[in-house]
Image (cartoon, rainbow, N blue to C red):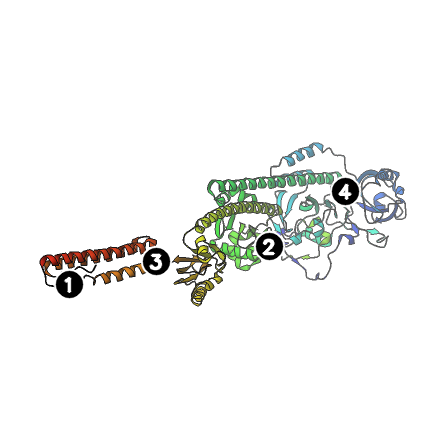
Amino acid sequence: MSVSFSALTRFTIAGSEGRDPESLHSIQTIQPHGALISVRERDLEILQASTNARRMLGLDDALPGHRLDWLGEDLVQRLRPHLDAPLNPVALALRCRLGVGATEFDVLVHRSGSGLLVLELEPAGPSLELSGRVEEALQRIIAAPSVRALGEEVVATLKQLTGYDRVMLYRLDEAGHGEVFAEAREPALPAYLGQCYPEACVPRMARQPGRRPRVRLLVDVDSVPVPLQPMHPLGEPLDMSLCTLRSVSPLHIQILKMMDVRATLVVSLIVGGRLWGLIACHHRTPRFVHYEIRALCELLAETVATRIAALESFIQEQAELAVRRLEQGMIEAISRSGDWRSALVSDADALLASLEASGAALFCDGELQTLGRVPEQRGLLRVRAWLDRQPRAAVIATSSLMREDPRFAALRETASGVLAVPLSSGCGEYLVWFRPERVRTLILGASPLLCADGAELNRAPALAGEQREVRGRAVPWNSGQTAIARLLGESVTDVLQQFRSVRLLIAQAQLAEAQARVRISDQPMLITDPEGRLVLATRSLEQLFGAGRLESLDALPGLVSDPATVRAALAALRDDYRPWQAEFEVCGADGRETPVLLRADPVFSAPGRVLGFMFLFTDLTDIKAAEDARQRLHAGIAAHQYHVSTPLCGGDGERYRELFAAIIGNARLAAEEVADGVDLERVPAVFEGFEHSVSHTTTLLERLLWYAAQRQGCEGGDEANGAPRH
């Protein structure tokens, strides 16, 4: 029966819910191309054997109960020197002659359970001279410049070495989902390259290095499994986790048959202690691969794994170097122009390529800067709000933002994947990378890698299978990329803190300079924060009130002549930001009252946001003195207008009257001009001088009038002939 691979796309758990997966420990059958013997190690007594062992060795009696040397001295002689050595997880391989016909076998030996040796017998293969081919393959693998090129090389090499129809490299991501990363196949076979499978399609045991062989061989899906006898010689099943001959589950056999696959070989790639991927080989006819070829495949796989680790490490190192260059560029930009952000967003290679991101955004100091493909600003602000709601972490990552919140579905073309690092302990400041969705057709079952360990399957394939198109999911961020993001975040945070520290020091220096200048001002002034706490008071204010008497704004009403009015005005200023001014007397430390004009104003940074309050005190002492002097001057001028005692008769009298009016007008004008333009401390003295001048002028004018009256002989009674009053 031939069924296309795409038809095997769906698993159902109908009839299997509530059952534990079939474990490797529970399988007690082997493939018939070999035989299995379990031996008690202390005395080498055979406890258990596969039912085909007697026939394969040409023996008449059952094996259990006999000592191992009954099979031939050659085996025991070769085995004994290794009994003190570790035999797990890499089995000991022996070439020896066994049985009646002294047939050559490859014997693989490992320990199982407590005090047991497991011997797996396979027909010995022909001697092969592969060193030259393997050396060439190793050189090509070592020279591979990228993981992609390495994958293509290894599948081609293993296809040539093993002769299978199809060889695939299956790569797993951080979440365990897989993809056929590289493929070498016969032209007539359909391509599996690029097909993706969910985490459930890779058996759990395959992800646990050390608990299974690195190489698994299935010779013929149509072969009949061979049981072990007796089943439980020690009261429990034999642990066959490390057995290369172990059978696979009937379900797995069924899947392979539907895929027109008769034989498989699977090799694990372990990188950094975890399952990085699998190399899967498929064949359309039964195929047995001898131990030496399988060992060479394992050797090549180890070399490939080492090369993968080196390439990924090199990529990581290059990314780290780019981060360091970026950090240095930001520092130089601060020195050059004071703007580190421009250096950050201008280096696309360091910021995007090292993380395989399509876009990035910087949220810092209330500003937004972007690079590459990112959502529009409204969408970016929504992403920032989502980040603010996440638990604090050094790195926040998701490959499906719409899975986190379906309302982000509209952003999937630019921001399905989000990777962010906080730049401060507060909210709202992040460096964020984006990836678009990667639309994939997900194969929900029948992974070509199920042959890695079919024993664990507990689901049945549905032949009416469907492929599911997955949207809204980006390529997941791997651990190396999250490490680079963390490093970039730390670098940006360091530069940001340096920048803010320098800015703080500059601001403090400017503040100290401004405070010093304001503090020595002759204008009495008080500055407070929005809560009324004292920020700065000038020395002249301390001289006005007395040192230490005005420690806070609440103390002000108690130091003025009208405390109720000032208290109400302060409340209106704080609550409603209402400016005000008023005149009152201030009681100094010496008890002397000083008239002042107080003006209070809020200082705004933005509408409705107050930075603090400013209070200006104007000493009215000189103004009051000047006003009193002016009033005295005007009163004196008015009095002198009536002191002229000489009668004004004749033409000379009228002329002198006009002259007197002009003199008085000039005095008044001078008084107004002096009040507006002269130092207030001098005003009383100037006005007193004006008053003396007017008095003197009045006396002189009386003299002139008297003189004129005498000369003209005017009638004026006794006063006409008498002397002037002054």
Q: Nearer the viewer, mark 2 or mark 3?
A: 3
Image disc number at residue 719:
1
Please report whichever mark, 1 or 3, sits nearer to the chain's N-terminal start: 3
Tell me the CA gap for discs 4 and 3: 105 Å
Please report whichever mark, 4 or 2, sits nearer to the chain's N-terminal start: 4
Q: Secondary structure at mark 4?
A: loop
**Residue at image x 68%, y 47%?**
275
Question: Disc 4 designates what residue?
Answer: 90
Q: Nearer the viewer, mark 1 or mark 3?
A: 1
Decide: is 708 above or below 449.
below
Tell me the CA gap for discs 4 and 2: 44 Å
Dividing the picture into quarters, in which one does residue 282 lie?
Answer: top right
Amino acid carrying label 3: it is: Ile
**Residue at image x 86%, y 41%?**
99
Q: Nearer the viewer, mark 4 or mark 1?
A: 1
Residue 205 visible here = yes
Question: Disc 2 designates what residue?
Answer: 392
Q: Nearer the viewer, residue 372 or 30?
A: 372
